[in-house]
Amino acid sequence: MSNKRFPLPATGGGYPIVVAGARAVHAYDRDALTTITITLSTDAEAEANGRRVVDLIREACVAGDLERVAILHALFSSIACRVPEFHVLVHEVIERGDRAEIVKVLDLPRRGRGRRPGDTFFFTSLIEHVMEAEGFDKATQAVEWLSRHRQELDLPDDFLPGAKALLNQHAMLGEYFQLWSSSVYVKPELLTLMPPELPGVPYTPEMIEKARFPPRDGSTWPHGIVVEIRPPHREK
């Protein structure tokens, strides 16, 4: 994905990214206390996960699939904003001037009410939790279990989507959940130095220097990591 107006930016020179996520889900009590252990790793599996995340973000950007881009950005914001194809997509969206698109892609504060993309991730993680807890091999079994136990569950807004909607969400987000809940390592050569520079939010030389890896001032990693730049929200 490259054109004369918005060519792909160069990669390399910045910090590597190591992330891991976890989400505590209890079908009967969302406030139940639990202990979660997160392990950060740069081993071969984590690196493969990182390459897959970058590929998913790149594919969604090239396809112009704003829904998938928005979800991937919400889950892997520090990675997504440094994928070259994301830069191009952001500049194209800004050029079109569609506020709804800009808000969706950059996950900016929204006007009015509505479910955020990350909300559907709750049900995906819930399905994964039920599959593990009940020993199910298929998501359809977990969805059937949720339907049977509907009245016993502690759900956001006391809302449970229909079986078809749940399975569609899981089909789209299942791999994202597996990656998000694993250790993910992305090498600098796959990423740009910094996120897209947005109108009205120029980078300063100091910001650029702090984003370089290894640090030129002799400090140890991590140091001054720039992972995301967002413009101030202004109400019209």
Image: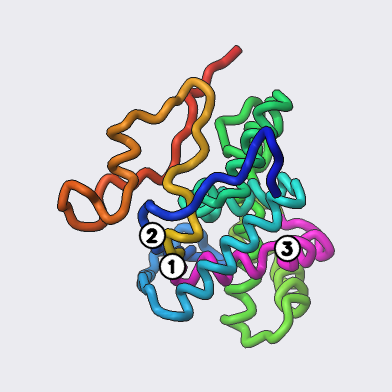
Tell me the crowding category of disc 1: few under 14, some 14 to 19, or many 20 or more residues within 10 angstroms, Cα based: many
**Residue range corresponding to the magenta coloring:** 160-184
User: Where does residue 116 sit, x and y in percent of width and height?
Assistant: 63, 43
Rendered view: 169 above or below 65:
below
**Does dot 1 land on a helix, a strand or a loop?**
strand
Q: Residue at x 56, y 30 (%)?
A: 109
Between circles 3 and 1, the one closer to the viewer is 1
Q: Helix or strand or loop: what does disc 3 sit on?
A: helix
Contact (Cβ within 8 Å) of mark 1 with mark 2: yes
How much space separates mark 2 and mark 3, taking CA atoms?
27 Å
Q: Which residue is mark 2?
A: 16
Q: Is residue 46 left or right of residue 56?
A: left
Residue at (48, 63) in percent of width and height: 23
**N-term-proximal mark, 2 vs 3:** 2
Q: Nearer the viewer, residue 180 or 93?
A: 93
Label 3: few (<14), some or many (≥20) within 10 Å?
few
On whether residue 108 falls in the magenta region, the answer is: no
Q: Going from the N terminus, do you reach mark 3 or mark 1 first?
A: 3
Name the residue located 80 percent from the left edge and 59 percent from the top edge. 165
Amino acid type of the residue tagged 2 in the rendering? Pro
Q: Which mark is in front, 1 or 2?
A: 2
Of label 1 and label 2, which has the lower sequence position?
Answer: 2
The question of residue 175 being in magenta is answered with: yes
Which residue is label 1 attached to? 185
Determine which quarter of the picture holds residue 145: bottom right
Instruction: Read off the residue under disc 3.
Output: 172
Q: Count all numbered tags in the image, as a single digit.
A: 3
